[in-house]
Amino acid sequence: MNTRIRLALAAAATLALATVGGVYTVHAAGRAAAGQAPDRQRSSGSGDRGLVLDATGQLVYRNIAGNVAGVPVADPTAPPVVSGLRCARFSAAHGTGICLTQPGALGTSDAVVLDAALKPIRRIPLGGIPSRARVSASGRMISWTVFMRGDSYLSTGFSAGTSILDTKSGQLIANIETLALTKDGKQYYSPDVNYWGVTFAADDNRFYASLSTKGKTYLVQGDLANWSARTVRENAECPSLSPDNTRIVFKKRVRASADKPWRLYVLDLESGTETPLAETQSIDDQALWLDNETVAYARSGVGDLDPSQVAGANPAGVDVGPAAHWDIYSVPADGSGSPQLLVPGGSSPTLLR
């Protein structure tokens, strides 16, 4: 995409985001004040160090008030540690975090890179509404996606911008749309190509992502060193690679209508076998692997939330009565079992391994 087209899109995105920002916040229950930057406040009872990103065995998430909180993954009902950090999307691994801040009045936000103590070490302005965020297992590679036009993957003509940051070299790829793409074995180019939802392999070079073009979605495998990508499978969105790097959990479009359009599936990369998971609700999330047998994800819900039962949900007196909200569930990755509630009023789950 040339500079003139980029500038035109950026101007259009700014106007569009002023409209869609309000739509986004309907689904982000318990949001923080618009545009509020992260801070390092520590809640009472948080321990000597408060919430940190180098403590293994912690399930870290965004609570209903927008604060990043953590509980032991072995006991998610335990009293949480609640930080003063507020994010629209959050991810962390190996002592590195990424916080996509709440959209401001014109829908703009920042990508804030964090150290293990949640201290901001780099801030990157974003020209869109936060959608996805992921940190590689080593903590070296970070990716995020923002909506530049439209506010939903169900929107026709939506535009997403996906960035990749190498925290070791400091190199920032502002938009991965310049990848040399091979589709169905042939070189492919189209001005409507969009990428989103990156997940990194253990070598910090191979990655997987979603691709949309000509009204269809694909799972792509990318190679950072060769700056290339190839389609792997049609109808696969928001991939997440298992810890052993052998399978991908993704959301699959199972209905053309907006009513429960997606279902979670697991793809075995070697055999190509797809397995539908026991979660039958429509999940619009980039799922998290808790281990090689279990995945976790945010599921939308509507109803009363008891503040005393919602982990870390109400440090600022946010109304958590009847409203749209998110809850974190888990389900076996082999298609067996049934969904289990882990954290009421939580979203953006990440596991510190």
Image (cartoon, grey):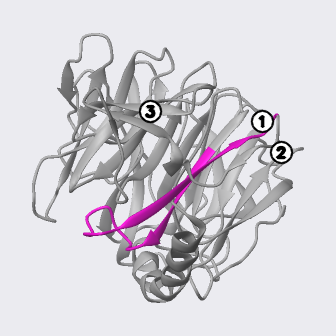
Q: Amino acid at mark 2?
A: Asp
* Residue 74: percent from left, percent from top: 55, 29
Q: Given this view, does label 3 or label 1 mark the residue nearer the observer?
A: 3
* Quadrant assignment for the C terminus: top right
Mark 3 or mark 1: which comes first in sequence? 1
- Residue 276 relative to residue 312: left or right: left
Q: CA distance from mark 1 to mark 2?
A: 6 Å
Between tags 3 and 2, which lies in front? 3
Along the line of sight, which residue is nearer the eye, 74 or 102? 102
In the drawing, what numbered circle is on residue 95?
A: 1
- What residue is shown with label 3? 229
The correct choice, above or below, for 59 with respect to 82 in the image is above
Report whether 253 appears left or right of 289: left
Sequence-wise, which precedes: disc 1 or disc 2? 1
Characterize the local packing of mark 3: few (<14), some (14-19) or many (20 or more) Cα atoms within 10 angstroms.
many
User: Residue at horizontal 42%, vertical 82%?
Assistant: 20
Rendering coords of residue 138 (x, y %): 70, 26
Residue hosting label 2: 115
Q: Which residues are magenta?
A: 143-168
For the residue marked with disc 1, what is the amino acid?
Gly
Q: Residue at x 56, y 60 (%)?
A: 63
Toward which corner of the image does residue 140 lie, by quadrant? top right
For the residues labelled 3 and 1, the Cα–Cα distance comes to 29 Å
At label 3, which amino acid type do we have? Ala
Disc 2 element: loop
> Dot 1 lies on which element?
loop
Circles 3 and 1 in contact, beta carbons < 8 Å: no
Q: Identify which residue, 348 or 220, lies in the foreground.
A: 220
- Label 3 vs 2, first from the N-terminus: 2
